[in-house]
Image (spheres, rainbow, N blue to C red):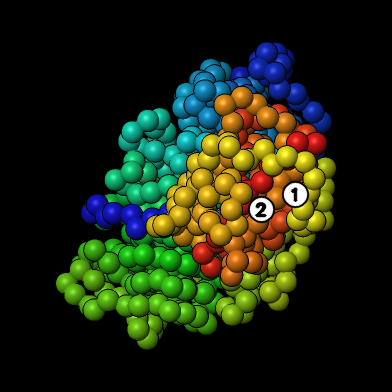
């Protein structure tokens, strides 16, 4: 059913030669980049280790990722692919070899096993390019951002899914990822995290899914019931219309997730599906649990959840909301150990740990983020920038420049952030979004000042500063103010708000030369 988005916003020597030709380096085997430990259903069926014990390869393009896969001795030779930079259609080509099956325009993890794909350094952004896992097993994807993948319009990739799994997939762990779109089906997007056609033993943890009509599904239709055993924990679903997730058959476990602005429906258990839902925090949302848009009902076990400003629709022939007083309708036996954070602290601990670029922090089970002990393969990101003086010297290069962004609330303008007037401002159409300053020719920038409007000081809770020409993360932080970074020549710079306590109001986005 179409629903509009309410957006507010191959031999080893040959392998080595192939890798070298692609410009990537092979290094000694080391431990997997995954830290914090695989959790949930991905621990079952023999567990999920990804490329542990394999060679480490650095890739800065999609073609290099494919070359790394194709450069292995076999399709099951363990490998850790460290990704840095922006992966897009222009740098993602098909590579052939006996140990791979790739395609242009999508990161293809097809008919392979024992792979870790991890973002390192300044970060890995898959821009308008999806990750497709098919007929594969033992895969880890960690510390990456996948954004704006379309199934219609231009360019298209991966059927519109940010991460899509289908056809006999086993043991996948996706961790500390940011998956986002900029609209719903009518804008060309599909799901953020989809599992179809016999996909089992999957965990999605410490990730952010936002600004999409569809969060994700388990099962492509009411007859696709061979999927399941999926765990969702410590994730933030924000500004999602529906499918958070949609389950058609199978078993799932959702705990310690923060759901904000589920606009039409949330966890949709259908066609005999069973889901355990415990210690989650649901906020400013509608119909967060139940069976929706079908008369083939599923069931749920609930405990310890918080429902904060959640509204419920009336039951109907294809509408069976669990609320307003959700009660368990089944029992789900969980085969693995896990520790629950108290639901009341879930918004805070998820805000501090979930998504790419958060240092792979995990909760200790007592609502306190813990930084995993670093190993040589641990991804690194720029440290948060401490706000400094708000009155730097020099000329504000933003004055007279251009401006654009991801969305804008009614009555606001992108141009307001570079007009020198503190009484005007830009707001995104939701609590997160981005605004950019741009020039016709490259400018050298080493410092920015972001000023919030009067009455909105402190609303911005987490942000990234991006070189919009390359996707490189220049700085991150937790409050607006001054950020400094190595001198960078660019045509466009973006201030991206990833968390806020309300609707941000950015009065000025000032840029300065050295």
| Viewer can see residue 358 | no
Residue 98: x %, y % from top left? 56, 20
Q: In the image shown, does 110 or 255 lie closer to the viewer?
A: 255
* The residue positioned farthest toward the left in the image shown: 317
Q: Which residue is the site of mark 2?
A: 450
Q: Secondary structure at mark 1?
A: strand
Q: Residue at x 40, y 30 (%)?
A: 155
Say which quadrant the N terminus sits in.
bottom left
Image: 234 above or below 111: below
- Looking at the image, which residue is at 77% across and 53% down? 391
What is the secondary structure assignment of the residue under circle 2? strand
Q: Is residue 21 visible?
A: yes
State the mark number for residue 310: none
Chain-order first, disc 2 or disc 1 = 2
Residue drawn at x 54%, y 37% as measured from the top left:
402
Q: In the picture provided, is 386 more to the left or to the right than 4?
A: right
Camera-near label (2 vs 1) is 2
Frontmost residue, 42 versus 185: 185
Asked if 357 appears above or below 487 in the picture, the reply is below
The residue labelled by disc 1 is 483
**Could you say where residue 204 lies in the image, as x and y percent from the top left?**
55, 56
Measuring from the top left, give residue 347's x and y in whole percent: 58, 71
Q: Residues within 10 Å of mark 1 (few under 14, many from 20)?
A: many
The x and y percentages for residue 200 are: 47, 52
Q: Nearer the viewer, residue 244 or 238?
A: 238
Considering the image in quadrants, where does the C terminus appear? top right
Question: Marks 2 and 1, Cα distance to the nearest angstrom?
Answer: 8 Å
Question: CB atoms at circles 2 and 1 under 8 Å apart?
Answer: yes
């Amino acid at each position: 059913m179409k629903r509009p988005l309410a957006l507010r916003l191959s031999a080893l020597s040959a392998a080595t030669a192939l890798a070298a030709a692609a410009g990537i380096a092979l290094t000694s085997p080391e431990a997997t980049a995954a830290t914090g430990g695989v959790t949930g259903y991905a621990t079952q069926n023999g567990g999920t280790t990804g490329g542990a014990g394999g060679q480490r390869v650095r890739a800065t393009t999609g073609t290099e990722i494919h070359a790394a896969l194709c450069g292995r001795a076999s399709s099951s030779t363990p490998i850790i692919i460290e990704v840095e930079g922006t992966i897009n259609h222009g740098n993602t080509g098909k590579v052939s070899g006996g140990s791979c099956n790739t395609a242009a325009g999508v990161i293809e993890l097809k008919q392979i096993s024992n792979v870790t794909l991890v973002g390192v350094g300044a970060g890995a952004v898959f821009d308008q390019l999806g990750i497709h896992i098919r007929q594969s097993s033992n895969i880890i994807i960690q510390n990456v951002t996948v954004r704006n993948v379309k199934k219609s319009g231009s360019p298209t990739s991966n059927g519109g899914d940010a991460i899509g799994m289908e056809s006999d997939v086993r043991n996948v762990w996706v961790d500390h990822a940011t998956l986002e779109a900029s609209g719903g089906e009518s804008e060309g997007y599909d799901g953020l995290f989809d599992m179809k056609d016999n996909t089992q033993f999957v965990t999605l943890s410490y990730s952010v899914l936002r600004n999409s009509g569809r969060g994700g599904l388990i099962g492509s239709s009411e007859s696709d019931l061979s999927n399941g055993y999926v765990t969702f924990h410590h994730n933030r679903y924000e500004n999602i219309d529906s499918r958070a997730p949609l389950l058609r058959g199978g078993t799932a476990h959702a705990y310690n997730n923060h759901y904000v602005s589920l606009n039409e429906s949330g966890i949709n258990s259908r066609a005999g599906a069973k889901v355990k839902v415990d210690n989650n925090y649901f906020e400013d949302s509608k119909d967060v649990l139940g069976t929706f848009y079908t008369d083939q009902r599923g069931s749920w076990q609930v405990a310890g959840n918080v429902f904060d400003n959640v509204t419920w629709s009336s039951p109907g022939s294809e509408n069976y909301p669990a609320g307003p007083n959700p009660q368990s309708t089944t029992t789900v036996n969980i085969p693995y150990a896990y520790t629950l954070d108290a639901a009341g602290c879930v918004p805070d601990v998820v805000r501090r740990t979930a998504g790419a670029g958060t240092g792979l922090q995990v909760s200790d089970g007592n609502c306190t983020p813990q930084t995993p002990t670093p190993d040589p393969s641990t991804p690194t990101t720029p440290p948060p920038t401490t706000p400094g003086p708000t009155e730097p010297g020099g000329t504000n290069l933003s004055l007279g420049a251009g401006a654009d962004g991801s969305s804008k609330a009614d009555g606001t303008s992108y141009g307001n952030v570079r007009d020198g007037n503190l009484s005007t401002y830009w707001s995104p159409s939701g609590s997160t979004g981005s605004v950019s300053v741009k020039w016709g020719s490259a400018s050298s920038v080493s410092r920015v000042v972001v000023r919030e409007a009067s009455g909105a000081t402190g609303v911005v809770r987490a942000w990234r500063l991006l070189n919009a020409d390359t996707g490189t993360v220049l700085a991150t932080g937790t409050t607006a103010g001054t950020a400094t970074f190595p001198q960078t020549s660019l045509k466009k710079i973006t201030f991206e708000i990833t968390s806020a306590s309300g609707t941000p109001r950015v009065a000025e986005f000032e840029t300065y030369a050295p």
